[in-house]
Image (spheres, grey):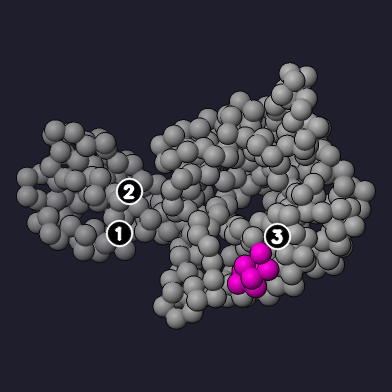
Amino acid sequence: MHSRTIQIGGFGRVESVTLGGGLSSVIQTMWKDRFSFSDLEGESGEAVIARIDGLKKMGCGLLRFAVPDLNAAEVLGSLSSMVSMPLVADIHFDYKIALRCLDFPIAKIRINPGNIGGKDKVKAVVEKAAANSRPIRVGVNAGSLPADIRQRVDSGCLESAEALVLAAEREIAVFDELGFNSVMVSMKASSVADTINANRIFAERSDVPLHVGVTEAGPLIAGVVRNAAALVALLSEGIGDTVRVSLSDTMENEVIAAREILETVRELKGAGGTPRPRGVRIVSCPRCGRSGFDTHAFTALWQNRLYAMDKNITVAIMGCAVNGPEEARHADIGITGAGDKVLIFRKGKIIRTIDAVEADAAFEEELRKQ
């Protein structure tokens, strides 16, 4: 059974995002730094807006910000009127922050009824969210379970995954009592197994949409591996309406990792005969002693730009003649090197041979022709 459908955004200049109902999972990431009004001014502000636009082009559909106080709510409120990306306010402890965020075109609120205050405060947030057509995400983490549930886990009376589900169901019951249906839930743990099991259990019991991911997953390599293990398992079963690959790394790499995981799931589910989602696919060799071309440096230089392009092509970045035009002949465009020369090829056929210093400009020129 598919989860219920939720609409996010779709007012003012904020773009509309629909999730749930069996639709493709929406990628999100979270802004990594604290924000102030000065960050939105002059060149700094232009850079912030450009970066958000870049994330959107790379495939990010939702962007979340921590909102620890009322000043942060004012700053995020100002930003929300400057961009088309739906922004999400992540709020803990003070319901007044949530109420203030709902005065702005902030597309979604993330709270925990359990730490936002008494039932009257939760009701105030829910009523204002309903009046402004703003959905709410309830976030449950393994490290911050309610005290009575934590005690049962510690005493061995309750499995960690079941504890996450129990805590989520308790929070959702508050919204049900208030008649608020535009809600979704996340149950995150640093344990891959607990993340998978909790989301499986909840999906069997409820049609509430799920945001999935492994929390505190670690640095780039460890974090991608752990998230991939959990997300491929869940998404392959149709569980997960939004995803975040949490990394101790850049937002761009979080989006790229999520995008690649979603594409892998599409392939595993046998969607090879259906059109691939529009976007550049990068294939590159790992480099070895045969390399005549620095694939690492070239990939790092071009990765974000390629993922942001609205082109449905495969780009190959290869290190030598062994892995060059022939092995990557399926690529729409590719680049490799031999000696002090760089080769650019299409479908295995060399189209240009140039000096290494000309590589970037020549590659960009040929890429435009695709």
Residue of label 1:
367
Q: Can I make out residue 165 in this image?
A: no
Query: Is residue 74 on the magenta stretch?
Result: yes
Camera-side mark, 2 or 3: 3
Q: Which mark is residue 108?
A: 3
Q: Specify the segment rendered in magenta.
A: 69-76
- Identified by mark 2, the residue type is Val
- Identified by mark 3, the residue type is Lys
Identify the residue at the far bottom of this view: 42
Q: Which mark is residue 215?
A: none
Q: Do tag 1 and tag 2 residues touch (Cβ < 8 Å)?
A: yes
**Which quadrant is the C terminus positioned in?**
bottom left
What residue is shown at x 50% (from left), y 76% (from top)? 38
Residue of label 2:
315
- The front one of 115 and 254 is 115
What residue is shown at x 12% (from left), y 55% (from top)? 356
